[in-house]
Amino acid sequence: MNKRGRKFIAFIPLFLSLVLAFGFFQHSSALVQCRAGESQESCKARLLKELKEKEEEVKELQQGIQQENAKQNALYQEIRRINAKIRETSLAISRKERLISRLRSEISSKEEKIRELNEKLKREKESLARILRRKYELGDTTILEFLLSSKSLSDFYHDVSLFSYIQKSLSSSFKEIDALKREIFEEKQELEEKKEEHANEKYQLALEKGKVEVEKRDRDVALRVSQSKEATLAQLKKKREEEIQKIRAMLIQFNGNGVSRKISFGEAYDYAKFAYRKTGVDPAFLIAIMQQETNLGGNVGGCYVTNLETGDGVGKDSGLSYEKVMGKGSLPYFKYLTEKLGRDWRKTPVSCPIDVGHRGSARKYYVGRGYGGAMGYTQFIPSTWKRVEGRVREILGAPYGVADPWNPQHAIMATALYIRDLGAHGKLSKTTYSSYVRAACRYYGVCGFYNNSVMNKALKIQKLIDTLERD
């Protein structure tokens, strides 16, 4: 791939991000609220339509994310294969380099031997030259010169004979040295040819490695493009999910019980199973708590708080006044929580006080009556929710910055964390039964009908779960 092509591919993530981001801001520019002059029914219908569209878009985005994941997995496999090829080629090149280095060493050794033979040949030639000069000097000596010399006749003939012998010996040595030189030179030539052959093979391997490295760079670019696209899709999916949460929060205003819906048993079971994996608290027990408290969200409270100083309120349907619906210690956090979630605290239903003293009415406060003020699917007092909220947010995330007791998954996770804090965890069995009974008592505040009802529900729910899992 040429440089221009690679630059174009590298530009794709930025272009895609800008296109998607522009689409997001265009799509989310409309505020999640009723329009001026729009009736509640029209507003509700429009929001429901938008909710459905956004949920469909989230599904499409999730499919896109999964496709990019599959593409990345394929690219990872290709890159692993290419990396293995690069390592294999690099090892082959290293082997060739070591072999070429060894051949160079052997060639140098041969060259050194040739130099030594040349030096030896030079010395012997010099010796022969001296012998020949001496021989010729003897050959030119006259009888008179010989008679005048101190040497005897036998010495004279002995020197001539010796010189002739040495001459012949040196000539023979010359031939041997020349033959050895030719032999070493031929060996050197053979080594040079091998070295050149391996050098060519190394060059071909280097070319192959270069091609594979280019292929790897292309795959790396494709992987970065896919990762960038996935990140953009994930970001957009997160934004759409936040919008969905806001729409659902808005739709609460149009639902008589103050929550968007009563959830199904299957949905509750899915949330409870996930909470079990995170906390170890039995799913059947968690569903039993939600069923006992709100019938899986069918009734999350019959009162509204109307006064943040006294905690007084009114019946949601009756409009009758109630003293101290919520305790003063919970009021500041209740206001903070509802505002963070985009709710009107005055129109957010909570539980009404109960006439535990059998005085005929719970509307007037009396010692021992206690408060209502429990929130959401599993009926947490605000001050208790505050103790577990951060951990719920850490596990599940929170688009509004706080965990939401009117979100069924958040509520079940919070219940699981709180029950574990109360000392109960593990599958419901003979060994854990008493710990779950104690936890149920403390969850409600006193022991009695509540914990008995919860435990009976948990056993029935477990039988249902066993049947579902078996099927």
Image: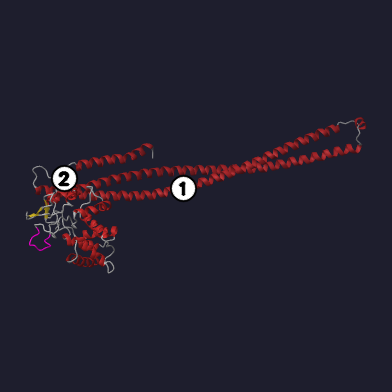
* Tag 1 residue: 87
- Residue at the location (79% across, 40% down)? 168
Taking depth in this image into account, of 192 and 385 the one nearest to the observer is 385
Does 149 appear above or below 60? above
- Please state if 73 lies on the left or on the right of 41 as rendered: right
* Tag 2 residue: 32
- Residue at the location (32% across, 39% down)? 11
Amino acid carrying label 1: it is Arg
First-in-chain label (2 vs 1): 2
- Residue at the location (38% across, 50% down)? 77
Q: Quadrant of the N terminus?
A: top left
Q: Quadrant of the C terminus?
A: bottom left
- Residue at the location (83% across, 32% down)? 136
Magenta-colored segment: predominant secondary structure: loop
The location of residue 277, given as percent across then percent down, is: 29, 59
The location of residue 367, given as percent across then percent down, is: 13, 59
Residue ranking furthest to the front: 367
Secondary structure under tag 2 reads loop
Does residue 265 appear in this view?
no
Taking depth in this image into account, of 389 and 247 the one nearest to the observer is 389
Secondary structure under tag 1 reads helix
Residue ranking furthest to the bottom: 430
Camera-near label (2 vs 1) is: 2
Taking depth in this image into account, of 448 and 217 the one nearest to the observer is 448
Residue range in magenta is 354-362
Cα–Cα span, label 2 and label 1: 56 Å
Does residue 126 appear in this view?
yes
The location of residue 299, given as percent across then percent down, is: 14, 58
- Please report contact status of discs 2 and 1: CB closer than 8 Å, yes or no: no
Q: Number of numbered discs present? A: 2
